[in-house]
Image (cartoon, rainbow, N blue to C red):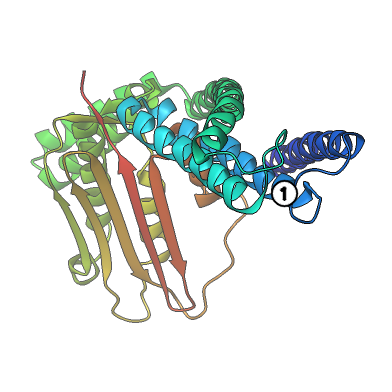
Amino acid sequence: MIQSLRMRTETKHVEWMLHALIWTSLFAYIWHTANTLGPFRKQEGSIYWPLLWSAGFNVALFYGNASGLVPWLFYKQRYKTYVVWSLLLYAAAVLGNAVFDHRYSLSLFSTEKEPLGSDIVQNIQSKTVLFSLSLGYGLTKQWFENQKLQQQVIKAALTTQLKYLKAQINPHFLFNTLNMAYASATKSNDLVTADIIEKLSGLMRYVLYESNEDTVSLEEEIRYLDDFVSLQRQRLSPELASRVQYRVEGNRQRHTVAPLILIPFIENVFKHGILLSRRSDVLISIMISEKSLTLETKNEKSRHARPAEPNSGIGLNNVRERLLLLYPDQHTLDIDDSESSFHVRLQLELTPKP
């Protein structure tokens, strides 16, 4: 992961160095051309300042469209909004450059100022070419980034599936054994043990089989979390279990979600937030709206907490990377890790069921 981040950083540095070289070369070419034509008809006999402010408008138009509007609006299929903002950006670049040219410099081939309309026409010609180049660059760059992202998602899915396969120590034998234990507990009228076995069997079946899909029903994912929290409460004393606040609000039947994307945060709560030394409250809250899901967890930390084991569970670093792959620009994750408490707030954009 560190090596991958380092490679991405180096690629970004090379890309920006190449952009700087192209813009500098273009500016130097125009500057050289201006010198070969002799003194320009500007008050102080120089075209250098007009070149500078024109370069500023060109850079703002190019990157404002290619690196801003294209990935934020066009590639998210918000075409009407993109058209409005791109026209505003284009008009601002044309009019701004034209006004500067008209007020502070004389025209290229005249000893006197021409009407503002003439300056606008000249800038429309140059800015149209520049805007077209920026659109082509932005779309091409976003396409390559999406292709790379898809490859990373496929690789991550294969890696996750491999981990699950390694964990499947003859799952059929385990399920058969659990079924036998459930039947035995039911026959003995031990309903608590039967309930635990049934929930444990459901958790294992979900992880091993149902979670292999790219997305699952949000209702199934929440049901998995319900059973997990219920089992965790059952292993605690009644006093400790009463300190665990777990609530889910909203309609869970209309959306899909990436499987097992929420459980690492809840596992972390039970692993580090249940304190035997003092009374401590634990909060797990899931709020579902029409378009998003918000998960919030809060727990106190032990004053003498042991350092985390290097290979304990999926880990928060892994789930961060999985969120970046599966929900790019579609999630926010805030983690407040203080000496005395741990607070997580995750917001996901949900996908409606087809």
Residue in the foreground of this view, choosing between 322 and 349: 349
Q: Which x, y percent locates residue 349?
A: 31, 39
* Residue that numbered label 1 is attached to: 52
Count residues near mark 1 (Cα–Cα under 10 Å), then give few for <14, some for 14-19, many for 20+: few
In this view of the protein, which residue sits in the foreground, 166 or 244? 244
Q: Is residue 217 left or right of residue 186?
A: right
Q: Judge from the rendering whether residue 200 lies leftward or rightward of residue 152; answer left or right.
A: left
Give the camera-side residue of 274 and 220.
220
Q: Residue at x 15, y 30 (%)?
A: 254
State the quadrant of the C terminus: top left
Residue 55, by quadrant, is top right
Picture layout, residue 12 above or below residue 258: below
> Residue at position x 32%, y 23% from top?
210
Q: Quadrant of the N terminus?
A: top right
Q: Residue furthest left?
A: 189
> In this view of the protein, which residue sits in the foreground, 80 or 330?
80
The type of residue carrying mark 1 is: Leu
